[in-house]
Image (spheres, rainbow, N blue to C red):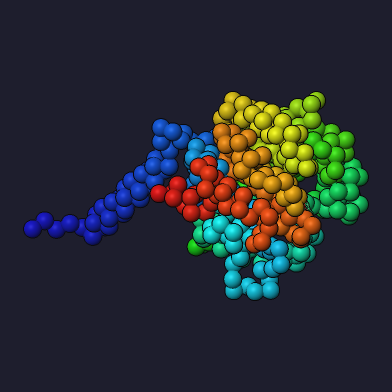
Amino acid sequence: MQVVPLNFNLKITHRSILLLLYIILFHSCKSLYNDDYAKPNLVDKKVSLTTKKLHKLLFYSSKKGFAIGHQDATSYGIGWNYTDNPNIIRSDIKEIVGDFPAVYGYDLGHIELAHKANLDSVPFDTMRRLIIEAYKNGSIITLSWHLDNPVTNGDSWDSTSAVSSIITGGTEREKYELWVSRVAGFIKSLKYKGKKIPVIFRPFHEMNGSWFWWGESNCTAKDYITLWQETVHLLKDTHKLHNIIYAYSPNKLNPDDDYLKYYPGDEYVDILGIDIYDFNNAEDYTKSLIHDLDLVKSIAIKKNKLYAFTETGIEKLPTPNWFTEVLYPNIENSGISWILFWRNARIDHHYMPYKGHQSEEDFKKFKTLPKTLFLNDINNLKN
Ligand code: BMA
């Protein structure tokens, strides 16, 4: 019998473990990509595996249809608020069609001030709990940020010029870095089974409109781009967050608008988006849907990026059959990964039907159409 020295044995075991680990790692990396889904060039080169999987899911949702999203889906609805009964997860969508949305939008406005609740009174502790629950069930999370004006301490709609004051060298730079660190702290705290939850971050949206302080005529495109790029660097490099996919979302394009005027560059954007609302003018809305979504699609295809309908809706849903007759035919073949309907805040400010609403039946019909993907549908895509 050959006597093998103990440390030789140990070496073998060590090597075999390493080999095994390598094989596992190699296989798990390899299996993420295939002939349809090539490795994307994401903003964050150190992006986590769960975030890569989120991107892949968004790719497949765009092939199959589009994921249905709702802002503050589980935070509140018409006649209820999660905080009144935290044992039940409700959603106006679920109560109508029997399934949850596939995408949940949440807004971080006022996290920068270290407030306990966001600008729409959703406590951040509640938001965290709801995000974790949504992710656990398979949903996709997208975060917007209606942050206050750092110069005046007014709100997002205080259009006093501020962008040049918060980029490097600006008088409020230190304050802005503190604000971003609070955003980072919240995103860092979103964990499930010990891993950070992947999120789509969509800051400084609708910049081609002039209603926000980061919008058209309140800052130059050059400063906007610097702000975006520096914000990405702060989150990714300073705060070492690797669970973020970045989405750029101008508002509906006016005839002279250039979609790429504020575009921070391919190395700073993962998803191209657009926000278009129907202000009780189906003809105008339809025109924008056709033109803008088509334009975003062609730019995204050239850039090899995914694209999405990042905000939409018609307040109070006064138009009969809006979902099936105005919206669906115009987005059916658009190739968007998801569509996000705005929040159900009040009877006079809501974008989704609720039990007893006149659009309930129309929304049920919308759910049965081939391209609409709710939570169960996107969970099936993962198999
Ligand atoms: C707007 C409105 C506001 C809200 C803001 C941020 O469109 O819904 O009431 O505060 O979004 O969610």
Q: Position of residue 180 (x, y in %)?
A: 74, 52
Front one among 223 and 8: 223
Q: Please provide percent x and percent y for residue 176.
A: 80, 50
Q: Residue placed at 73% from the left, 55% from the top? A: 350
Along the line of sight, which residue is nearer the eye, 374 or 97?
A: 97
Q: Residue at x 52, y 48 (%)?
A: 368
Image point (63%, 73%), residue name: 86
Picture quadrant of residue 250: top right
User: Which residue does the image show at 89% across and 49% down from the upper left?
Assistant: 158
Residue placed most toward the observer, 46 or 278: 278
Which image quadrant: the N terminus?
bottom left
- One can see residue 173 in this view: yes
Residue 76, position as x, y percentages in the image: 69, 64
Taking the image as drawn, is residue 168 in sight?
A: no
Q: Position of residue 36 (x, y in %)?
A: 44, 33
Number of on-image labels: 0
Q: Is residue 73 left or right of residue 9?
A: right
- Tell me the quarter of the picture where residue 211 sits: top right
Query: From the viewer's perspective, is 225 left or right of 300?
Result: right
Given residues 4 and 275, the one toward you in this image is 275
The furthest residue to the left: 1
